[in-house]
Image (cartoon, rainbow, N blue to C red):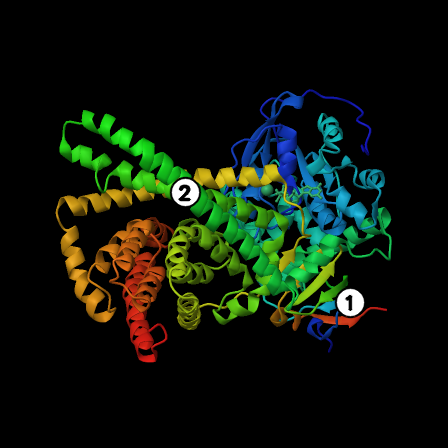
Amino acid sequence: MSAVAVSSQLPVFPNRKIALVGNPNVGKSVLFHRLTGHYVVVSNYPGTTVGLSHGNIKALENIPVIDTPGIVTFPARSEDEAVTAQVLLDENLQAVIQVGDAKNIRRTLHLTVQLAEMGVPLVLALNMFDEAQSRGLQIEAGKLSRLLEIPVIKTIATRGRGISDLLLALKYVPASKLQVQYPPVIEDALAKMQEYLPESLISKRALSLFWLCHDSVSAVWLSSHLSAEQLNALVDLRTNLELNLSHPTEDIIQNTREQFVDSLAHQISQKDINQGLSISGRLGRLATHPLWGLPILAVVLLAMYWFVGVFGAGTLVGWIEKDLFSGIINPWLTSQVGELIPWPFFRDLFFGQYGLWTMGMTYALALLFPIVVTFFISFGILEDSGYLPRLSVLSNRVFSWMGLNGQAVLPMVLGLGCVTMATMTTRIMNSKRDRILVTLLLALAVPCSAQLGVVMGLLAGISFVGTLVWLGVVLLVMFLIGWLAAQVMPGERQPLVVELPPLRMPVVSNVLIKTAARLEWYVKEALPLFIIGTFFLFVLDQVHILPKIIQALEPMVVNWLGLPSEAATAFLLGLMRRDFAATGLFVMRSDGILNPLQMVVAITTITLFVPCIASMFMMVKERGWKQGLAMIVFIFPFSVLVGGLLQRFLTYTGWLG
Amino acid sequence: MLTLADIKQDQSIRIVAMPELSESVRKHLHAYGLFTGRTIRVLSTRPEMTIQIEETELALEYSVARHILVEVSR
Ligand SMILES: Nc1nc2c(ncn2[C@@H]2O[C@H](COP(=O)(O)OP(=O)(O)O)[C@@H](O)[C@H]2O)c(=O)[nH]1
Ligand SMILES: [Mg+2]
């Protein structure tokens, strides 16, 4: 599929790298794995690719390759885009591979033009060629290559097509020479800037364009390479230019590029008309259809419930927790290793009732791990299938009541798996206001998979009405608090603008890699929090404070919530281990001291509590002490308040008699 | 003046201007190739507006669509 004959072959330079750059979701990561041939450390924020992945291309003398986060256009507008811009400024690159979506040729070329202006050695990989073809889009890669004077290779990363051509092209990549002509005033400014700019890894012209567009990444770089006078001269130049222009400079520059790209696209691409809608296209429409969207959502949720709730939390936890840990590992460790520890204090610390191993590790590895694994797999499938953005369209109205937009559905759904991780994912949201709102709602009204498992198990024992009451109250609280918080929070709501990628069949390896990366995160970040939490509980127990706290809670539990005093223990321990709360309530139910009404009240209160001690730590870590604590201090009394009100309401109406 | 929010399903239109949109939203739209002069197609109007720019489908809510001035392309 090669479009360019490789004329000469230069040796690969030592100490140089190759960078993969491109719009989000064009197949950079898949191509990265194809090139490196092995799955290397993927440094992922959960949810998005933030940060860089490093690898080596064996076929090219092990030259290092970097996979960058997607960038839509320069100047960078978010933290992860800035990472990509930084790579171009700082790394001495043997070549930049722009991965482009062949079917969105204009959007791809927009970035190509900007990269080419930088004068870096550039190769364009026109990826997703299969999708372009199936939509009747003809692209003449050879002609494009001649027009831009850079190698252009057609690829289908998922099937490994075009990789060998790409490798061949990479052996020698000349620096690109493309220059777009801007209006004379801008060209003047660009010319004047040349004398002030220092040498850099990208062309002075590109650096000047960055400057005129108020790019912040290169501005930081410039300020460390220029004197104050030089910087002032640059500022004056820019200000003068802006006074002479009727539109923002950036708009004029973008429009010039747009015209250039448009004429390019006309010359090299052609679309067959009368293409019918594909099956994936039709399904995609249905998924956001006001009517059909809902049954599709129901099927998705049901499938997830089955896989995570029934298979993960039921079958897998049964094997691992009951058979493996409680049956074999823990008794063995306690008797064999525990006996070797001469001091009772340390024996208890590791193997006692609140032992770091018997409670903390067992909970994190045996109970949560299987649930989290199955959840991450299904979330990865959802993510790769392209369904999630459609869900945000479907739910946009609902979230707009809460001062958010449909994009908030992502952390919320992730919260159904693990609130701790979802709290961290709020980082991907654009405004601080949204991050605070979503963090609060996650802590208050989104039960995590461990919590859901418990709640479902308990509710199954009582009437269907009980389940509805629980669901109704939790949703009501979410909307009410969301609405109130949105009223008092300063800042404006961001409108929804979201790309709907084609629905695709998820690639197994891609899903597994993402799952592995998230599990790595879970082990590194969440697991230690459980250990710390257990230690906390252990200390409270050692200094004999635990019974006192439980005693102090009893009046509230009995008088306000109308529950038996034993429920206080379940509540407190439930903070650490969801299943302890469940077991406690189960026992009380079978002892006949908990009627259905009390059960619903207890479950609702527990659901509204912060899910676990790890998620509390995470809230504080992400939002800082003040905000984190404020939320926690609000949530506990508030959930008890709601529980008590519910108890009175249900008693009054006699629904669960 | 005709805005994107007035357009029916399956109609093709040309973007005329995007005044009054906040800087950040306008930039966001530019990033997807939604420039003045581009021809786009409306794919659906419920629950939010979905448009097609080249082969990209973009969903945007009405509060945004109302600020995009358009003309029906011949
Ligand atoms: N049909 C098709 N899908 C592809 C191709 N390359 C990547 N994909 C899919 O596009 C999606 C995004 O790929 P990814 O590598 O995560 O994109 P990135 O955001 O650029 O790193 C994944 O679902 C891939 O399976 C391709 O050549 N053809
Ligand atoms: Mg990626």
Chain on which label 1 sits? B
Q: Secondary structure at mark 1?
A: loop
Relative to residue A556, is residue A153 depicted above or below?
A: above
- Residue A615 screen position, x and y as percent: 36, 51
Pointer 1 local density, CA inside 10 Å: few below 14, some 14–19, many at least 20: some
Quarter of the image for residue A60 reads top right
On the rendered image, what quadrant is the N terminus of chain A found in? top right
- Mark number for residue A317? 2
| Residue appearing at x 40%, y 42% in the figure | A318
- Residue A520 screen position, x and y as percent: 45, 37
Q: Amino acid at mark 2?
A: Val
- Residue A267 screen position, x and y as percent: 86, 48
Tell me, yes or no, whether dots 2 and 1 are on the same chain.
Answer: no
Judge from the rendering whether residue A382 lies leftward or rightward of residue A486; answer left or right.
right
Nearer to us in this view, A75 or A651: A651
- Residue A8 screen position, x and y as percent: 78, 23
Pointer 2 local density, CA inside 10 Å: few below 14, some 14–19, many at least 20: many
- Mark number for residue B49? none
Using the rendered image of the protein, determine whether residue A334 is visible from the camera's viewpoint. yes
Q: Which residue is mark 1?
A: B10
| Residue appearing at x 73%, y 60% in the figure | B52
Q: Amino acid at mark 1?
A: Asp
